[in-house]
Amino acid sequence: MCLIGEAACERDLIEGGIGHNLPQEDPRVFAQAVVEVDSYVWAASI
C-alpha cells in the first residue's frame, strides 16, 4: 500500500504471461479490479 496525499492506493502484481492488454487477456482479473476500485469510490463518498 502507498499513500498519495491523504488517499491510499494499492498495487497488485498480475502474473501468468499477461501483457499490455489486461481486459482482453484476463477479463476476470480486470473486472475484479474495476469492482474493487468502484468500492473505494463509494466508501470515500459516504
Image: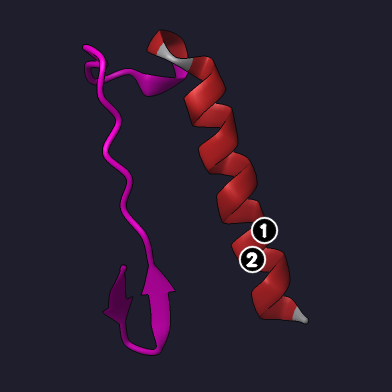
Q: Start and end of the magenta stretch?
A: 1-23
Is residue 44 shown above or below 12? below
Image location (x, y in percent) of residue 25: 39, 10
Residue picked out by circle 1: 39
Is residue 4 shown above or below 32? below
Residue picked out by circle 2: 41
* Left or right: where 23 falls relative to 38: left
Tag 2 and tag 1, C-beta contact below 8 Å:
yes
Image location (x, y in percent) of residue 6: 40, 89
Asked whether residue 20 is drawn in magenta, I would say yes
> What secondary structure predominates along the stretch shown in magenta?
loop
* Left or right: where 2 falls relative to 36: left
Q: Residue at x 55, y 20 (%)?
A: 28
Q: Quadrant of residue 26?
A: top left
- Residue type, numbered disc 1: Ser
Q: Which colour scheme is used?
A: secondary structure
Q: Quadrant of the C terminus?
A: bottom right
